[in-house]
Each structure stands twice: as structure tokens, then as C-alpha cells.
């Protein structure tokens, strides 16, 4: 029979792998809006990790900051500036100026 | 079941180390300042999770399941305190991480408005284009 500790470690491994995939996608994504969404997914996985590591007060602080406020501020920044992560070709095209 | 527990805890620790590596790559190698800010938030959050994991008591060799560091009785007896000290996780990293999250929020807001000013002055957030500007 699966004990409570084993179940805790199973969820811990699952959420950490989800956060690893979300981090990889967020760093390599060209579209910044989608990168912010992947970053929010990673923050959700970290919230479950904080709860499983017996820190529910950290989870309560972390949810509005990292899932709510960080994506809102970065979406505001993306809306004010540019959306696509830069490619080297456009830099080479501007080289003569 | 102890080997399975150890394996899954190692998966967790190695995922956090790989997250640190990927976010450091994002900070140093991605050209856009906004992507650097996203990678910086991921990096600081990973450092916070590792700090909490240092204070976690039930590393896979311990049989007793841990509890949050909250004493629920108002007038604790000696046996209450003994069982609390044997099962509660360490509260010191949690206090430090609580401070670090709030400071990280302030730093991120500062970096966001610096990036906004850079875009208003230079019309780009690409560090390769900014490094080519003159005057």
C-alpha cells in the first residue's frame, strides 16, 4: 500500500517535472505573451511545491505575487513595448544605419 | 518503499537544479530585456524553493510525516512541545523566503520601469541593438 510520504514525494516529483517543462518552454519561446503564460504555469507548480514542503504561509504569499502580479506587470510591459523576442536577422538588417 | 521515496526526492532536487541552469541561460543568452526579467523571476523562485527544501524535515530516511511550524495549543505541555519539535519543519528558511519574495517583487517592478524607459529612449528592448547605438 502506498503511504502518505510516498504520495507526497510522488506529487513533489510530478510538479517539479511540470515546472521544469514550463521553464524550458518559457525561456525558449519567441512570443513573449506565451512565455509569460508558461511562466505563470511554472509559478503554479511552485505553489504546489511550497504546500507540499509544509510551508502554506509561503504559498499564500506566493500565489498573488507570482501567479497574479508578475504576469500582470510583464503583460503591461509587453503591451507598452514589443511582443516578439528579437532575432539576429533583423539586427543584421539594421547594421548599416 | 524507501528507495522509491529517495528516487522521487532526487527527481525534485535535480529538476530544481536544472531549472536554475535553464533560467541562468535565459538571463545571460536571450537578447530581449523582457525575457531576461522573466528568467530572473524564475531564477529567484527556484532559489526560494531550494531554501525551503533545505528546511524540510522529512528527508526520505525519516518515517514520521512532517507538519507546518505552527503550534496549535495555546498552553502547551512538555509532551506537546516534544512532539512539535520532532515533527515540525524548520521555520527559519520560511521567514527568510517570505522576505525574499517581497524584495523580489520590488526589484522586478524597478526593472520593469527601467525597461520601459529604455524602450522610450531607444525604441527597442534588444540588448544587441542597444549596444550598437552611438551618442
Image (cartoon, grey):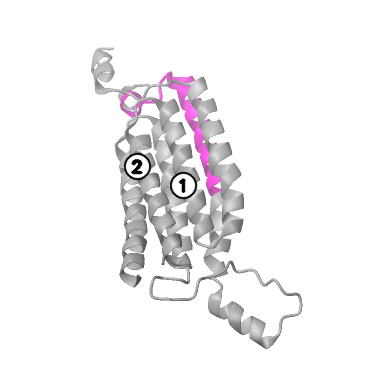
Residue nearer the viewer, A89 or B119? A89
> Residue sitting at 47 percent across and 54 percent down?
A49
Residue nearer the viewer, B119 or B49? B49
User: Can you name the residue that lies furthest to the right here?
Assistant: B75
Number of numbered discs: 2
Answer whether residue B106 is visible to the viewer in this image: no
Q: Which chain's residue wears label 2?
A: A
Q: Which mark is residue A12?
A: none
Residue on which disc 2 sits: A21
Residue on which disc 1 sits: A45
Q: Quadrant of residue A35?
A: top left
Question: Residue B10 vs residue A81: left or right?
Answer: left
> Residue sitting at 35 percent across and 61 percent down?
B8
Q: Which chain's residue wears label 1?
A: A
Distance of label 1 from label 2 (alpha carbons): 11 Å
Q: At which x and y percent is residue A65? A: 58, 43
Answer whether residue A91 is visible to the viewer in this image: yes
Q: Quadrant of residue A84?
A: top left
> Residue sitting at 40 percent across and 25 percent down?
B125
SS under mark 1: helix
Residue range in magenta is: B103-130
Amino acid at each position: 500500500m502506498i503511504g502518505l510520504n510516498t504520495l507526497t514525494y510522488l506529487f513533489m516529483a510530478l510538479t517539479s517535472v511540470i515546472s521544469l517543462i514550463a521553464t524550458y518552454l518559457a525561456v525558449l519561446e519567441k512570443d513573449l505573451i506565451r512565455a509569460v503564460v508558461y511562466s505563470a504555469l511554472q509559478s503554479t507548480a511552485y505553489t504546489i511545491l511550497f504546500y507540499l514542503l509544509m510551508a502554506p504561509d509561503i504559498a499564500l504569499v506566493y500565489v498573488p505575487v507570482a501567479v497574479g502580479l508578475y504576469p500582470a506587470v510583464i503583460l503591461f510591459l509587453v503591451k507598452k513595448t514589443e511582443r516578439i523576442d528579437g532575432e539576429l536577422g533583423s539586427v543584421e538588417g539594421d547594421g548599416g544605419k | 518503499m524507501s528507495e522509491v521515496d529517495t528516487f522521487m526526492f532526487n527527481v525534485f532536487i535535480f529538476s530544481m537544479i536544472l531549472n536554475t541552469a535553464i533560467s541562468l541561460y535565459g538571463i545571460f543568452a536571450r537578447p530581449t530585456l523582457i525575457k531576461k526579467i522573466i528568467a530572473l523571476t524564475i531564477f529567484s523562485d527556484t532559489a526560494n524553493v531550494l531554501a525551503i527544501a533545505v528546511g524540510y524535515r522529512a528527508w526520505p530516511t525519516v518515517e514520521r510525516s512532517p507538519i507546518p511550524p505552527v503550534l496549535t495549543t495555546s498552553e502547551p505541555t512538555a509532551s506537546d512541545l516534544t512532539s512539535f519539535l520532532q515533527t515540525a519543519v524548520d521555520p527559519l528558511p520560511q521567514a527568510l523566503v517570505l522576505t525574499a519574495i517581497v524584495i523580489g517583487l520590488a526589484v522586478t517592478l524597478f526593472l520593469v520601469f527601467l525597461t520601459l524607459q529604455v524602450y522610450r529612449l531607444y525604441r527597442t528592448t534588444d540588448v544587441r541593438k542597444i549596444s550598437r547605438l552611438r551618442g
